[in-house]
Image (tube, rainbow, N blue to C red):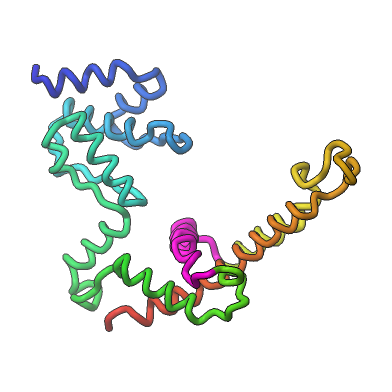
Amino acid sequence: MSDTIAKFLKELAQLNAAQRQAVEQIEGPVLVIAGPGTGKTHILSARIGRILLETDAQPYNILCLTFTDAGVNAMRERLLHFIGPEAHRVHIYTFHSFCNNIIQDNPIYFGANTLEPISELEQVELVQELLDELPALHPLKRGRSTPYFYLQHLLDLFQIMKREYWSLEYMEQQIVAYSQELPNKKEFIYQINHGKFQKGDLKEAKLEEEQFKMEQLLAAAQLFPIYEKKMKKSAPL
């Protein structure tokens, strides 16, 4: 038995019963439901290692898709730990990069041979352009010394909206509903007498701060359709 296999089997022995059940199920689909930071990447990587150990599958026969580049790196590192250099032969992509590869490899089916995903730099430039077009009193620029203070926040929000298929209408409904409920939330109401404030009084300063955050979030979400139009306009013909 090689050192790599021995180390891998040792790792498997440390899994709990539920984790081991997911790893040992090498035939058919397995659904792993768990929150952030609970070891999903660890379990999925271990399952890949188990499949390679117990079947005739080769590393290049396996495709792993994640949402983020960080997920790709985490999966690759975990597989390197489990199965060694063979991990480099496993196909690991984000959904976007995988789809882009398909388009680039099959241009005849997609009507173009120059399609490329927009780069991170181009995304930043588009958001900068977007912010430059906003008036000085816009919620995302008001009181800020730089017009680009919320640039990264916008990029993150747009990525989430696209990934989760959140429409502007959905965002508006959720923000309005949350904002209307704020005065009823316990954290915005004095629970005991405090100075000149009586139990049951609103914490007005804290409430106004949260309401302004919601105003900013709504203003940011309303920029998403404009950002999408700029993306399409900047795409090569």
Task: Identify which residue is drawn at 15% across, 22% down.
Answer: 5
Q: Nearer the viewer, residue 232 or 105?
A: 232
Q: Of helix, strand and loop, which mostly describes the magenta segment?
A: helix
**In the image, is residue 3 above or below residue 76?**
above
Residue 160 within the segment the image draws in magenta: yes
The quarter of the image holding the N terminus is top left
Task: Identify which residue is drawn at 41% across, 22% down.
Answer: 18
Q: Is residue 153 left or right of residue 52?
A: right
Q: Position of residue 139 (x, y in %)?
A: 61, 70
Q: Nearer the viewer, residue 56 or 164?
A: 164
Q: Position of residue 21 (x, y in %)?
A: 36, 23
Task: Identify which residue is drawn at 56% across, 71% down.
Answer: 141
Residue 233 within the segment the image draws in magenta: no
* Residue extent of the magenta highlight: 145-167
The quarter of the image holding the C terminus is bottom left
Q: Nearer the viewer, residue 126 or 60?
A: 126
Q: Position of residue 225 (x, y in %)?
A: 50, 74
How many numbered marks have been drawn onto this rendered protein structure?
0
Q: Is residue 147 left or right of residue 11?
A: right
Q: Residue furthest left?
A: 2
Q: Position of residue 143 (x, y in %)?
A: 60, 69
Q: Is residue 224 left or right of residue 92?
A: right
